[in-house]
Image (spheres, helix red, strand yellow):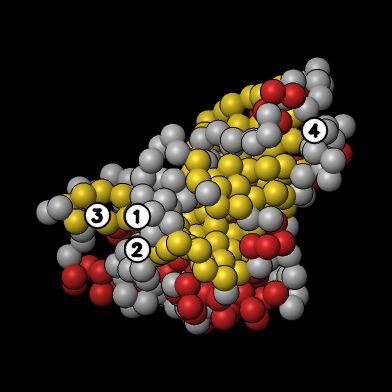
């Protein structure tokens, strides 16, 4: 694991709303379209004109969102003991992969965190839940208690459930990129609220790579680094994304399934680069909760089957460490 040192303000994440393409690449874009979908702002950037691009993007986004919320939303909660839920192929694939990540992370990532997500409701909360309510929700969390038989999900107890929010955008980015190429759009960037998917050849880079600017979340206009990527995902989880303040304490949205409280692993953000979007999405959460040391051990295990995986950890003290970041020519100022 390589280490870097930045100033106290220099911690970073991939840009949340608009990707910054360095070396002037953005000036070559001939098409950009922005939508609100999947509870976030989504921006498409292409380097060739296609007459029906807007309707195509809207259609693909709508299809992805419908697919991922077919069972009633991004959260599925059991209304009775021993409930079964029939999933479509997309959701079954996400559950299957999430169970693997839950196991590899020793439960620091857990798709059954839904009761805690509902309880905290960080987007609307003004105060933390009671310790009693948190303990009750934690008792319903446990990936080892659910099972998937084909496309049938088994939820053992009333109130338990699964959360697709930690993987849905990563999955959608891969699927949308594939369909865009199938429909004649050869290269571009899909920004699903900070989940970045690049595909095809960058026409202004000899190697066909996209240079993605890395932003300091504590300095909204400051760019402190970049990575060079091609046909992959760049996905970040951070404590600064969604939170509320109560009694001068910040409570963010990334919950530790073991404690029931927002993760406190000494990290400000984690960026994962991987060609598998759903996996990258899950891992960014898992690594943030587990911390840099345990997270690096997880990555070592996964790198045998996914040699393109890289991660960049931004610690709360302003230091930065990485795993395999040299694969993407990571450059920090």
Residue 67 in view here: no
Give the class, few, some or many, for how many residues have Cα within 10 Å of label 1's Cα (few <14, many ≥20).
Answer: few
Nearest to the observer: residue 305 or residue 201? 201
Label 4 environment density (alpha carbons within 10 Å; few <14, some 14–19, many ≥20): some
Q: Of helix, strand and loop, which one carries label 3? A: strand
Marks 4 and 1, how far apart at CA: 34 Å
Q: Tell me which numbered mark, 1 or 3, is placed earlier along the sequence.
A: 1
Dot 2, how many residues are within 10 Å of its Cα: few (below 14), some (14-19), or many (20+)?
A: some
Which residue is denoted by mark 1 in the rendering? 8
Q: Are marks 4 and 2 in contact (CB under 8 Å)?
A: no
Left or right placement of residue 10 versus residue 277 in this view: left
Question: Are the residues tagged 1 and 2 within 8 Å (C-beta)?
Answer: yes
Q: Write down the residue under mark 4.
A: 204
Query: For the residues carrying marks 4 and 1, which lies nearer the camera in this image?
Result: 1
Q: Which sits in the foreground, 245 or 212?
A: 212
Find disc 2 in the rendering and name its residue.
Answer: 317
321 to the left or right of 33? left
């Amino acid at each position: 694991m390589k280490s870097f040192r930045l100033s106290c303000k220099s911690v970073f994440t991939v840009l949340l709303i608009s990707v910054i393409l360095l070396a002037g690449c953005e000036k070559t874009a001939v098409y950009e379209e922005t939508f609100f979908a999947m509870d976030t702002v989504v921006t498409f950037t292409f380097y060739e004109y296609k007459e029906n691009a807007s309707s195509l993007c809207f259609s693909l986004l709508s299809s992805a969102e419908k697919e991922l919320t077919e069972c009633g939303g991004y959260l599925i909660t059991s209304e009775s003991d021993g409930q079964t839920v029939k999933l479509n192929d997309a959701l079954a694939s996400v559950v299957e992969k999430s169970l693997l990540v839950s196991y590899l992370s020793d439960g620091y990532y857990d798709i059954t965190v839904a009761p805690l997500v509902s309880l905290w409701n960080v987007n609307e909360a003004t105060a933390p839940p009671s310790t009693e309510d948190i303990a009750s929700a934690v008792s319903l969390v446990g990936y080892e208690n659910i099972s998937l038989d084909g496309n049938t999900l088994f939820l053992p107890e009333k109130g338990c459930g699964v959360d697709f929010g930690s993987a849905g955008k990563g999955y959608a980015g891969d699927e949308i990129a594939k369909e865009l190429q199938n429909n004649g759009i050869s290269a571009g960037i899909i920004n699903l609220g900070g989940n970045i998917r690049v595909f095809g050849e960058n026409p202004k880079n000899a190697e066909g790579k996209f240079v993605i600017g890395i932003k300091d979340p504590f300095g909204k206009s400051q760019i402190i680094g970049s990575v060079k990527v091609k046909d992959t995902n760049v996905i970040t989880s951070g404590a600064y994304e969604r939170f509320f303040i109560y009694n001068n304490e910040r409570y963010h949205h990334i919950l530790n399934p073991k404690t029931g409280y927002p993760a406190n692993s000494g990290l400000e953000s984690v960026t994962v680069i991987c060609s598998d979007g759903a996996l990258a999405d899950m891992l960014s959460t898992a690594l943030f909760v587990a911390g840099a040391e345990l997270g690096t051990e997880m990555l070592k295990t996964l790198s045998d089957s996914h040699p393109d995986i890289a991660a960049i950890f931004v610690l709360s003290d302003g230091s930065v460490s990485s795993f395999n970041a040299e694969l993407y020519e990571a450059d920090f100022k």
